Amino acid sequence: MSYIGTPPSNAFTSLLKQDFSTSATTGYTLDHAVNNANDIALFINFVRQEPTAGYAASGTTLTLTSATASSDDMYCVYLGQALQTVNPANASVGTAQLADSSVTSAKLASGAVANTPAFFAYQTSNQTIANTTNTVVSLDTEAFDTDNAFSSNTFTVPSGKAGKYYFTIGVRKNNFTSSRFNISLVNGSGADVVSIEQGTASAYGTANGSTIVNLSAGNTIVMKVYQNQGGNQTTLQGIHQVYFGGYKIIE
């Protein structure tokens, strides 16, 4: 059925009630401001008093015609104020309706706030690294990828997921030494986000490290490795040997 104006509520409504601690006085304070005596129903010893004749009310001031006694029972019902026992419509409550600090962690569902997007990819086959060439590290297996944001060895910040990201990287050499062996994270513009160099003495040494980067939606990050041993060399594959992972930091 259609209605003109505000549709009638399909929920129960209860009027606001205020109890008073009485004494030998004619003056009391209302919890809610009113326009006049007709905005409340006043009861003394369970007998309703006549507005204006038995009492006056304006703002939060209630004035009785005759003083009460400390033994009297007195309460009022606000006729112009009501509380509806109705649930808000779906998607009707937003940030503007919530007071600052009104939502605590105790009221959040498990997983409602998470460090996502999050991913971890690693290498399961040794990769050839050309001499003196910054080579994109091949990461063929994913342990997890919450937002499907890692693909073709590249992490791409999803739409609406801009912010600070923590990344961890590592590459292990497969039995070679060189005067320079380093890994780096490179953004879509080709600039190093972080560069980490490993000592050259160990033939099976690992270059690893971590960093925090501020990224915008659509930004891309890849991991690269460089060696100058004098010929092609290989990585030593494994989930703890050659890897690239990261997640968005909760802000």
Image (tube, grey):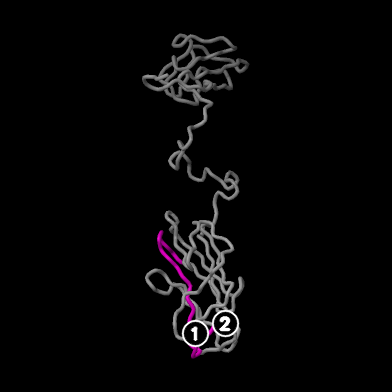
Residue named by callout 1: 227
Mark 1 or mark 2, which has the lower sequence index? Answer: 2
The quadrant holding residue 124 is bottom right
Where residue 105 sits in the image (x, y, percent)? 58, 48
Question: Foreground residue, 5 or 105?
Answer: 5
Residue named by callout 2: 173
> What crowding class fits label 1: few (fewer than 14 Cα within 10 Å), some (14-19), or many (20 or more)?
many
Q: CA distance from mark 1 to mark 2?
A: 10 Å
The quadrant holding residue 21 is top right
Q: Quadrant of the N terminus?
A: top left
Question: Residue 129 colored magenta?
Answer: no
Question: Foreground residue, 35 or 230?
Answer: 230
Q: Amino acid at mark 2?
A: Lys
- Looking at the rendering, the stretch of residues picked out in magenta corresponds to 213-233
Identify the residue at horizontal 59%, vertical 63% (top origin).
143
Identify the residue at horizontal 43%, vertical 72% (top origin).
186
Question: Residue 224 colored magenta?
Answer: yes
Q: Amino acid at mark 1?
A: Gln
Please report contact status of discs 1 and 2: CB closer than 8 Å, yes or no: yes
Q: Is residue 201 above or below residue 77?
A: below
Question: Foreground residue, 211 or 16?
Answer: 211
